[in-house]
Image (spheres, coloured by chain):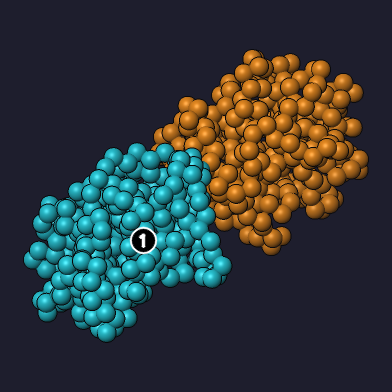
Amino acid sequence: MIELKDLSYVRLGVSDLEDAESFATKGLGLQVGERTAKSLYLRSDDRAHTLCYSEGDPGDQTVGFEVDDEGKLAAASTTLDALGHPVHIGTATECSQRKVKAFIGFKDPTGNRIELVVRPERSGKRYFATRDAGITGFSHVGLFTTDPARDERFWTQVCNARVSDRIGDIALMRVNAIHHTVALAPGRGPGIHHVNHQVESNDDVLRSYYHLSGQRVPIVFGPGRHPTSGARFLYFLGPDQMVFEYSVGVDEIEDEDTHRPRQFGFEPSSLCMWGAKSVWQR
Amino acid sequence: MTLNIAATLPRSPLIQLCYVRLAVRQPQPAAAFATDVLGLQPVPDKHALLFRSDHRYHTLCLATDAATPSIGIEIADENALGRAMEALDREGFQAREATAEECARRFVRRCTIVQDATGNEIDLVLRPAQSGRRYFPSRDAGITGLQNVGLRSRALKDDLRLWTTILGAHVSDRAGDVTYLRFDQKHHRIALYPSHRPGIVYVGYGVESMDAIMQSNYFVQERQIKIVHGPGREPASGQIFLRFEGPEGYVFSYGYGLNDVGPDHHPQQFSAQPSSLCEWGSECRDVPELQFADDR
């Protein structure tokens, strides 16, 4: 079994790097960790980067998960190989681009690009946000799935994810105590559904609602509250139609052994208990 | 003279905000709003449209026979009311004893009807009626009770004299000249908003959670009810609020998280900026009293 420890980063291709930087700093509020000719590394917590924008195809979207060590990485490689997922072993250049010691790349059954990384870099300097959005860190991703049941099996049987709750057939899955690290979302093809950052308080969610509205950033869902995780949320559009989320108050699954996934109906009130309506167009 | 009054009165003879009487021309739409939108419980009555929001017999009256809105405040006892009436007389405020009929319509044993310097009517009442039956709301808005009232003031200095010197309320904080007044542990029960006319800025109900505020935010939006301010958070009082338009120009407010204030609280002055009325960044465009002159 592939033991995912934590989410590490998201890598996104963007059509206009300057535009992406403006959004990431003035809108989202992340800190620029490093700029290279074609890439922008952004921090959201004590890690050296959690989001990397690279000039290129906006369809290039990759999620990185941390595994324990190189032994576990080699084992994962063997497992994936045996299941018929072609595995790419990261070169030294690619590793330095990701600020990790080693990594492998593969695709999940839907075709989402996943990387497993070892020893992602932390930064000695504390995180200092560009604006007072109250971000406490990069927390989870939504991944599109063309077959929710099949992909749930991949994440829970090939990897160590556990289902925390389901909305219809859509699984919200955790790899640690946090309610979910990966949320599946039905889609026509692979891709990242949304990128979540946690913020300090309810106040931050609502402050950002007014701040982003004032900046003409399209709000696609919220402010609202998920009945599943209990989190208060706000979803909004970034460059190239990528959706970002702020949330606060995600439940922790306290008892790993006794937690049973709850089933929520596939209806709007399962996504927002306040009554917000999604205007998401994907 | 003024100095002695404070010394002769007990700390605060004011007990609680009891009710709000709103003068309405068209009672039926207003009553429908009170139950279907606000979620209050109607109380059967021959004379007026009454509504409950908590354990009290009524906290809202929609009156067709009243010319102006008024609020009811409970006074500790006969002695306190007597002292208050003497002080009102000395200080030149208009006050009259309500008739038995007027008391019956207010569900109180005794009532003195006072005009503040602005012209707002304030009932100082004794023994307002409680209800034996628990409150059962018309919709799940999470209302915990009538919480506070915003009053327009066009004579702030004299209105403050009435509330503080004569009636013993305390200034909790100020935002610009907006003045929050308390007479129990809650940050404010009355807020005075500088204006050029008398009246009520909003009638505020406490709700049980932030969820309740946000659920009502979407509930009223779906019904095309105009939100005039919020969802927002008042930095002085800490409360999360939603203020929306009701019938005949009245504004209603839900609030959650109103701070408790200790007796040694020193009033703070917040700057005359929109962020002093909402720290989240919501702005009010329709109610001049909820804006500062520079922003209008």
As drawn, A158 above or below B261 = below
Disc 1 marks which amino acid? Answer: Arg
Q: Is residue A213 visible?
A: no
Q: Which chain is orange?
A: B
Which quadrant holds residue B135? top right
Q: Which residue is at 73% across, 22% downward?
A: B49
Which quadrant holds residue A95? bottom left
Q: Which residue is at 23% across, 71% downward?
A: A82
Q: Which chain is cyan?
A: A
Classify residue A145 as left or right of residue B24.
left
Of the pair A161 and B144, the residue shown nearer to us: A161
Where residue A112 sits in the image (x, y, percent)?
A: 23, 58
Where residue B43 sits in the image (x, y, percent)?
A: 77, 27
As drawn, B155 above or below B3 = above
As drawn, A92 above or below A215 = below
Mark 1: few, some, or many residues within 10 Å (few <14, many ≥20)?
some
Where residue A137 sits in the image (x, y, percent)?
A: 36, 66
- The quadrant of the picture occupied by the C terminus of chain B is top left
Q: Which residue is mark 1?
A: A153
Q: Which residue is at 70% across, 23% downward?
A: B62
Q: Which residue is at 57% across, 56% downward?
A: B268
Where residue A58 sits in the image (x, y, percent)?
A: 16, 53
Q: Give the structural element (helix, strand or loop) at label 1.
A: helix
Query: Which chain letter goes with mark 1?
Result: A
